[in-house]
Image (cartoon, rainbow, N blue to C red):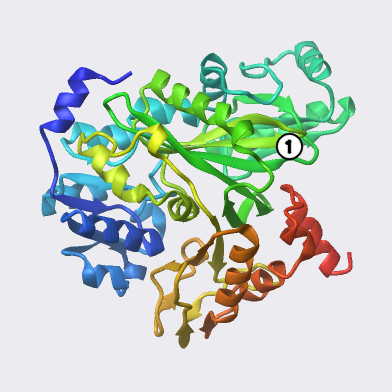
Amino acid sequence: MADPVNEVYLADRRFDRVLIANRGEIAERIQRACRELGLKTVAICSEADRQASYGKTADSFLCIGPSNAAGSYLNQDAILLAAHLIGAGAIHPGYGFLSENAAFSEAVEKAGIAFIGPEAPSIATMGDKIAAKRAMILAGVPCVPGPDTALPDDTASVERIAREIGYPVIIKAAGGGGGRGMRVVHEAEQLHQAIALTREEARQAFGSAALYVEKFLQHPRHIEIQVLCDIHDNAVWLGHRDCSMQRRHQKVVEEAPAPGISADMIGPVGLACVEACRQIGYRGVGTFEFLYENGAFYFIEMNTRLQVEHPVTEMTSGIDIVRAQIMVAQGLPLEMRQDEVECAGHSFECRINAEDPESFLPSAGMISDLALPEGQGIRVDTHIHAGYRVSPYYDSLIAKLIVHAPTRADAMAKMREALSATRIEGISTNLPLLRALFEDEGFARGETDIHYLEQWLRQRRGQ
């Protein structure tokens, strides 16, 4: 439910200057939304990003630290100092880096600056996979079979829980994410070693050794539901996405809507997500992630931030999610109600990465020449240009190619044309992989699950 005190607090401090605590294409995207709302922007950078194009178009541009992310984009003190020096009334964290850091959200708010994202308690609750699952069960959101408590320490109890769930099971870190801190266990003899290894990995990667266990689904799809909530108790869901095309738990291609899932099937799940947001007092944008198998949805986690794949939902819903996100942070009510949300057509997004298409090793260096597609139903979100130097310090994502058309078949054809018109010289990219994927018959028929891409890659290599 909305907090009356917080509602007044936010409404009394409409901001006019936003510091963008991120880099790359998402910094460019946020800056565009701010300009459309008449807000001034503060771009920050590390030493490696001093020549970034979005720095030249921002109203202010500050270097806050060295090339390594720990000293710059993850340096909370430096970001807050920059915000105070330049008079920013809000901070937008984008995705990655500090976007789901509850301590940062709290520090920003305590500094009298609006955090364009959820409040710290919401981030903390949904960041803890056990607490998140418990909250979702209370809200009626379907979850993967397994207890909503951490794994006990005693051997007999662990064996009993796994046996009751039924093998295979998956051991996960309570504070994990990004495909780390998880192991599949196919039989009882593997259980204790898997727990020991995952517990240590969780302790080192996430600072907590807490684990939980769930049923491991064999051939699920990865389905997402996008939500948008204000502080006036308004919440909507904006359709659904299929993000099954993954390699090592990293998404490569996303689409909206998810093929083969009817409105009658997804509707109750979307409404349950909205209800869950109301129960935890959620503010801003968020994404509920599900595994979908044999006609059933199973909640796995909620991302309490803007996601890389938000453009496919924008293209199908006609709603500018980043703009809405900023307006919610200003205390304004949503501009739409659920019965006004109408999703139409089909959209694909390809993540273009600076990496070798065969080995997937990152490819840093200078972009010597660049050609990007244009036309109706084609969108490119990027920060690169001819002469841009791709840094070895950060994620390899350099552009997102998005298309929209009336049908899925039309959208696939448009994406094939757009990919063929895209040229990036001077570095290696995954464009050859993406072009080949959009020629694949199984993908064209929508016959995919989260293992499809890796199996497809093995077949191409003759393994």
**Residue 370 or residue 322, whichever sits in front:** 322
Question: Local crowd at mark 1 within 10 Å, few (<14), some, or many (≥20)?
Answer: some
Residue 408 lies, in percent from the top left, at: 62, 58
**Residue 422 or residue 250, whichever sits in front:** 422
Q: Where 441 falls versus 249 (above or below)?
A: below
Quarter of the picture holding the C terminus: bottom right
Quarter of the picture holding the N terminus: top left
Q: Amino acid at mark 1?
A: Arg
Q: Where 98 falls versus 175 (above or below)?
A: below
**Residue 70 or residue 12, whichever sits in front:** 12
**Element carrying mark 1:** strand
Q: Is residue 187 left or right of residue 24?
A: right
Q: Quadrant of residue 305?
A: top left
Residue 357 lies, in percent from the top left, at: 67, 72
Residue 251 lies, in percent from the top left, at: 60, 54
**Residue 260 or residue 289, whichever sits in front:** 260
Residue shown at 55% from the left, 75% from the top: 418
